[in-house]
Amino acid sequence: MSKPTVLITSASGRIGKELVARLAESGEFSVRATYFTESKAPLLTALGADEVVYFDLNDSATWAAALEGVSAVYSASLDPMLEGHLAFSKALGERRDEIGHVVRVSCMGADTNTASYDPQQHASRVGAPIPLMLQHYWWGEKSLIDAGLNVTVLRNNFFMNHLLKTDSETIATEGWFSNPLGSARNSFVATRDIAEAAAVVLRQGAQVHGDKFYDLTGPQPQTMSEIAADLGTAMGVTIEYRPQSMEDFETDFGSTRAEFFEYLANGFYCRASPDFYNLTGHKPTAYADYLVTPGVSGETGLDELWQGNLWKKGEDAMKQAAGLNQQ
């Protein structure tokens, strides 16, 4: 009997690489991994993908070949790619008789932590709307639900590998980083843990996890000074955290990302969720361990720190997406 085929979108990303390796290791699926940049295709094959296919969320002509014969989909997309994801969700819905399960990567708080979704009503700040980035994550979830698919959503805290990438140059050359999070505690999550949770959910299937939502976090909330200490230990040097004003941060990265960081600075992500433990049977990865321990794809957190980064100082990566209306 042939194995079911699972499509891994964003397969060359941090979570995707780990997921490809984990599912290949399990041997339960035929793993079809997508790439956008052709030079990344050999890596996906090396990690165990049975097939690699070109895929572009912004080009619907690439979707049919990627979806042929697929019964499960891992869905992930960068924040500026929301419009493409919304359209792709509709295409998945047209195949809902064939696609029995979609696992979507989202963001903790996308549902506003309330019983009903009102984008103008923040759950903890009177008179404030929900940060636009979280509204976008909710649209990404809702588009799949509205398409009539069996969906499992992994709502993740802020990724450990995204936390300091914008400061990788000053970390490497001058030994410091800055952001406006200060003494606020956040339970940052390792992307390898998200991949492990996704692998468990895909392997156990929609009959166990369909129409369920899991909050994934780290094992404990940490301040920036604690993060600096862990990073310094891993690198064998002293790393300094320099507080930054929210105004300067907004100048660096734009209002949409600054609004989200205000959310973090106000302690909304300090919670340590039990969901990862309940899915996998063990604690999530601590930041100190993430930095020095390889994931199944072979890379440590320190390796990830020096790799590509969407968020660059002086550029508002969300400028175009911020003008997108819900569809």
Image (spheres, rainbow, N blue to C red):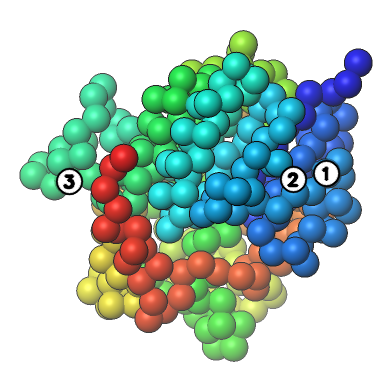
Q: CA distance from mark 1 to mark 2?
A: 6 Å
Residue 157 as seen in the image, left or right of residue 266: right
Q: Which residue lies at the image location 62% right of the left edge and 36% below the top edge?
A: 74
Of badges 3 and 2, the one in the foreground is 2
Q: CA distance from mark 3 to mark 2?
A: 37 Å
Find residue 108 and report its horizontal and vertical position in percent: 41, 39
SS under mark 1: strand
202 above or below 224? above
Residue 258 as seen in the image, left or right of residue 300: left
The residue indicated by pointer 3 is: 129
What kind of residue is marked 2? Ala
Crowd band around label 2 with a 10 angstrom C-alpha radius: few (<14), some (14–19), many (20+):
many
Which quadrant is the N terminus positioned in? top right
Crowd band around label 1 with a 10 angstrom C-alpha radius: few (<14), some (14–19), many (20+):
some
Kindly check if marks 1 and 2 are in contact, taking CB atoms under 8 A apart as contact: yes
Q: Which residue lies at the image location 17% right of the left edge and 46% below the top edge?
A: 129
Badge number at residue 33:
2
Judging depth in this view, the residue of 38 and 278 nearest the camera is 38
Comes first in the chain, label 1 or label 2: 2
Badge number at residue 51:
1
Judging depth in this view, the residue of 169 and 1 nearest the camera is 1
